[in-house]
Image (cartoon, grey):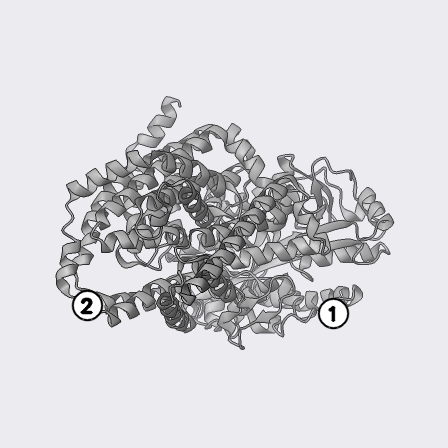
Amino acid sequence: MKSKILLSLTAVFAATLFLTQAYAADCNWKPTRAVTYVVPWGAGGGTDANSRMLSSLLSKKFGVPFNVVNKTGGNGVTGHSALAKAKPDGYTIGSATVEIATMHWVGLTDLSYKNITPIALVDIVPAGVTVKKGSQFKSLGELLAYAKANPGKLTGSGTSQGGIWHLALAGMLQSEGMPADAIRWIPSKGAGPAMKEIMAGGVDVVTVALSEAKSLIEQGELTGLAYMNPKRMSALPDVPTTVEELANDWTLAAYITVSGPEGLPENIACSYDAAAKEAFATKEWADFKASRGSDVVYMGSKELTEMIAKSDVDLGETIKGIGLAK
Amino acid sequence: MSADVFWAIFNLDNLTVIFVCTLYGTFVGAIPGLTATMAVALLVPFTFYMDPIPAISAIVATTTTAIFAGDISGTLLRIPGTPASAAYVDDAYSLSKRGQAKTSLFVSLTTASIGGVVGVAILMLMAPQLARVAISFSSYESFWLASLGLTCAVLTGQGTVPKSFASLFIGLAIASVGIDIAVGYPRFTYGVPDLLGGISFIPAMIGIFAFSEVLRTVQSNLDSSTASDLIKEKVSDASSRMIKALSRYRRTIARSSVLGTLIGALPGAGADIAAWIAYAVARRFSKEPDQFGKGNLEGVAAGGAANNAAIAGAWTPALVFGIPGDSVTAIAIGVLLLKGLTPGPRIFIDQPELINTLFGSFFLANIIMLPMGFLAITLSTYILRIPRTIMAPIILLFSLVGAYAISSSVVAIWIVLALGIVGYLMEQNEIPLAPAILGIVLGRIIEDNFMVSMIKAQGNLLMFFERQYSLVLGVITLLLWCFLLTRMVVEISSGRRQKKK
């Protein structure tokens, strides 16, 4: 914070000294043609929704189209590789998600957060435990008790094998002293397809972000059993947290970032950082966040990189714990 | 409909938006390689400055016309604008070569408009009920539906059954390139990162249809006199032939429109499968099934009506549950959210005027499309005046630029060239091209849903028939397979006999 104040003071100073150009030249890069916005997950999920909203706001700010491209498949590898390996000229940015810190642990790819340039944090999304309306399970306790008595009978979905929502489920089961596959994981291309599956009765439970399930919970189509967060979600105050429901204090949250390819020049990264910060301050963004039941968050490039590095270590532990590490 | 809704639809802003977007949609759709999805994506920045109603009208008008306009390049150049047009591109192109390009396109246009109107009417009457059915489709049902789509491709392929199967399998083999969904293992990528995501269908389609056609043109000595005969078709003749076709095939058109809407409403199915199934059903009920694929207007009418009806159908799950049926509705949901509107059952209660205006704009877009389309057809048929010898290199150039533009990777150009040669060799051996395209489009969907279902069922194949809809779809598909296999055996054995003679 101190450095930010210092920075803005310097800026003011510089401006008064007619040296604006020297300062502005650092962070005033602007795209002059269409920008590709890579999303590693399918249309209809939370990453997709956040990315489409942010790219709309960025496009409004810069006056060029930001084309959202859903590069799905390969459990997130395809999209993340496309982002990491793109030309670092500012014309390809995209959403790197928490999977950048998990994929390499499960042996999917060598790609890690070191191969991207984190620009800004877009969203922090705690997982939830959601069942279809009319499900026999009225609480998380009932669900877990059934799974304990009938291991392998229930199915859960939400993302790919070893993906973040899989870790949420398996990690929770394990923290409760059950085998990680007491509820079998059905891979899906993302939260959107998983929601379709649970609506169709194809799986018993989804552990996607509660914000992703929120609209269908409000419509009464799905029932939220738990929120994997220390605090209840203000938009869904009736859904208890895992901390309340379970003896241990298991929580898990994914995150979505806007990131650039490896080696994105500093001036481009900080221009996008500033633009994202500006977008996050708009009323549209606040309304959008409120409609999804999540809070507006912000973290700049440096802070974000540290956060990802830490989560990389933590999630590595979880993955090793449930025996998915390779 | 109340007066408010009426004025919301017919106010000047909204009318202007619809008018401009039909123009834009026609233009984008007619250019090979540019898709309806891309057209809508490019539109998003403009919707910031619009009210919710014109914004939605813009998206609706653009997609409707872009899907129709895909037929223009399909008919004139044999480059289907979208995979949805690929079902009947051979019919349309044959008609064009016979000098009836305008007739074929007029039929495409009017049936597209009819299909669109029927689609919205169904949407208005029963969107919530339809969405209920659509949402009960799990991976089992999606697998069968996609299989049914593939089966229809073989059923309608104008070659023999074994050759249609060959074409389909070529398509499926191409679709197997890329990272496998279930276990994340890269297949046939040879270390090329651009192939990890698989071979996308646009370069594939451009290669198989357009480039192979260029290769054939180079070989054949077309004299320019025949070429100029082709465009002498008078608008009045074409119109009267169109009217005749409309009244003659009214049942096919009605059936295809309803079928298209219903299939379009199913998540993951969309306009492509709709066009193919409608085409196959039309052929089944036709009095002249042998003519299909060789320039039959009934096929053009069936596919043309179905794919535009499916556009309307695709809005069902998006509006009712906020779950997008395809990439266009995913973008539309994004725009609605940006305007502070959350799709879901409550939007029908809280914002009925928005929903009714959406429906009204759909109607209007489908009607304004008619004069615009007539204009576009009349102008674009002048392309046929250009001698094929000059046209061929231009098509080649367009194909390569288009393929590059869509993926901004050089690999796409190689895909066009390689698959163009594959397409050429297939044609030389009388293997139909269309089933291969469907194989590429549906291969991934089928594999995905199959793998997910198998994991769910823990390898128990009977689970594919456990659920109500999956049982029905599964049985239909299996019956069709039995029928096709018998026909194949008959064709092979009769082929041998003929050779002996």
Q: Amino acid at mark 1?
A: Ala
In this rendering, position of residue B128 left or right of residue B153 = right
Q: Nearer the viewer, residue A192 or B471?
A: B471
Q: Chain of mark 1?
A: A
Q: Residue at x 32, y 34 (%)?
A: B364
**x, y percent for residue B302:** 37, 42
User: In the picture provided, is A228 more to the left or to the right than B153?
Assistant: right
**In this figure, which residue is indicated by the disc labeled 2?**
B390
The numbered disc on residue A325 is 1
* Mark toward the viewer: 2 or 1: 2
Residue pictured at 77% horizontal, 58% vertical: A171
Q: Marks 2 and 1: CB-CB under 8 Å?
A: no
Give coordinates of residue A76: x percent, y percent: 59, 63
**Residue occupying image coordinates x 57% and y 73%:** A115
- For label 2, the crowd category at 10 Å Cα-Cα, with few meaning under 14, some 14 to 19 and many 20 or more, is few
Number of numbered callouts drawn: 2
